[in-house]
Image (tube, grey):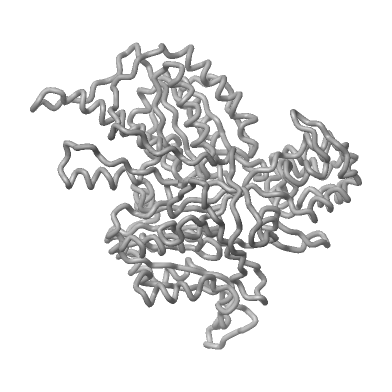
Amino acid sequence: MSAQLLPLSIPPLSDEHSALLARLVQTLDSGGLWWLSGYTAALAQSRAQPGVVTKPVPLPTDAVRLSIVYGSQTGNARRVAEQLARETEAAGLGVRLLRADAYPTRELASERLLYVVISTQGEGDPPDDARALVEFLGGKRAPRLPELKYAVLGLGDSSYPLFNASARQVDARLAELGGTRLFAVGEADVDVDAVASPWRTQALQQAREALKPSTPLATVTPLRPHPVHEASAHSRERPFASELLLNQRISARDSARDVRHLELSLAGSGLSYAPGDALGVWHRNPDAIVEETLDALELDGGQVVTYGNDTLPLREWLGSRRELTKLSRPVLAAHAALAEAADLNRALAPTEQAELAALLSTHQFADVQRRWPAAWGATELVAALRPLTPRLYSIASSQSAVGEEAHLTLDVLRYEAHGRAHAGAASGHLAQLAEGDCASIYIEANERFRLPADTSRDVIMIGPGTGVAPFRGFVQERAASGARGRNWLFFGNPHFRRDFLYQTEWQAALAAGSLHRLDLAFSRDGLGVVDAAGRVDAAIPRKTYVQHRLGERAREVHAWLEGGAHLYVCGAIRMGKDVHAALRDIVSRERGVDAEAAEAYLSELQSTGRYARDVY
């Protein structure tokens, strides 16, 4: 959800400066705005005398401040960091909150109290907004930190082998640099609050001991005297019951994939979003998955189970409260102990990460129970399984075009494994909804995946499969706003005839001039590999992906980037890595530099907000 710009009330700025300010604040999240307000207030204080420009006033030596730095891919780390900042400020302590890519690394050597809240994505990678900071900490330029006291909270998903690797890396590196760890690194799973809440309590207590309550260094005057409109009452904790307006298949009937276009009503919700944001969906496990799990466990779904403050039938616990399709290391460890399964225990060993990754990606809980039978009791099962968590889907629309609606592009997960049909929980839940049914939803802002504030900038969008979803919203928004910049889309999928998502819309956009270039890569439609004699071997399909199309358009892609274009990538993590490698090759070849210099060029694009990724 983008922040609403407040009109400046008789601003002491020229028209040019007012326009520049408006463009800047549109690109900042709450952390960036907090930092900017403090920075400009300090500058104003230091320039109070007419004609005299001095350095910003430093903090008094007895007014040590807490710095909270967060790196967030899906918004969870940001929420935890913001809550800790509010609690610290309410306690009368000096605090600043910064997104990792806005943190001035030159100030690290003078930090005295630092809290880092960071998520981990994919194969142990930091979130995109924290990559530069993590690399700086691990590099030769990182300073010694003998006076620093710090603590780290990690947010991750234990269904991935390298659980909270980024937090562990930052925690260990700060210690190597001489920092004093205040308490052990926190490692939160998808049930974030179970670890984050006690971690915040401990962090606040340590901050009270380290800091003296202080008054703010400067008072920031509101930009207008009347209050801002209240935000929607609906959030992750209080989702909105959204009516489903349309559930339409947009892949061919004979396609191997069932891709749906969903349209959901926001009428009466007060919810708004910007292109690039995600829709959070609270789902139920489909009945078929629940019944299959009960059957494998040989448990009675009607048995009443009390756990925590809730008393529900076991069937309802499994349907609405517990994860059944996404496994985690703790769940597998508990199952291995109960089943006395030596081979499952071996897969959990730190040296067997590849085997564990394969197990986590191919098994649901019912599969594990059938393969390694264990005598679970109903209460013990509820306690061991992870809480159900919402799923995030890129919004495939612009409110400028669709009004009080949010559109989704949904790939319905279905596959065969272990001799049985399997389905995805959230996609299965959404796919079975009929028009008029309701889904529990909320908006998850993605401040790092925004169209350029300067609408004259060109944009390059790379989104194979359902990764094309946000770019449908981008093109709608650019058309509605009359953006002067050009739009170039790279799209790929297995087959042209079966899987060309939104084909007629893209063709209409090309005809209308709201899409200027469209490059396609249908990986399974290749004629075959051509041998040395020029013969086509149809038995060896030639697979062409979006990264190959990028390479074929290398000179033009580089020219667009040199001309100031913004670059966006959305889709699977593996695809994101392949596209990044292709971009690095393009920069290296077109600029005549080595791979290291090309990587630095791309990093600079990322740090300035001109290269954004939404990968999952």
Q: Is residue 391 visible?
A: no
217 on left or right of 66 = left
Q: Position of residue 172 (x, y in %)?
A: 53, 30
497 on left or right of 42 = right
How many numbered dots are placed on residues in this image? 0
Q: Position of residue 20 (x, y in %)?
A: 23, 46
Q: Is residue 489 visible?
A: yes
Q: Is residue 445 above or below residue 208?
A: below
Q: Quadrant of residue 133?
A: top left
State the residue in front, 73 or 89.
Answer: 89
Q: Quadrant of residue 124?
A: top right
State the residue in front, 96 or 594.
Answer: 96
Q: Is residue 15 above or below residue 459?
A: above
Q: Quadrant of residue 222?
A: top left
Q: Position of residue 155 (x, y in %)?
A: 57, 36
346 on left or right of 544 = right
The furthest residue to the left: 51
The furthest residue to the front: 268
* Residue drawn at the location 37% of the way across and 68% of the way down: 554
* Residue drawn at the location 48% of the way across and 55% of the way down: 404
State the residue in front, 28 or 98.
Answer: 28
Q: Is residue 501 above or below residue 304?
A: below
Q: Position of residue 131 (x, y in %)?
A: 45, 43
105 on left or right of 578 = left
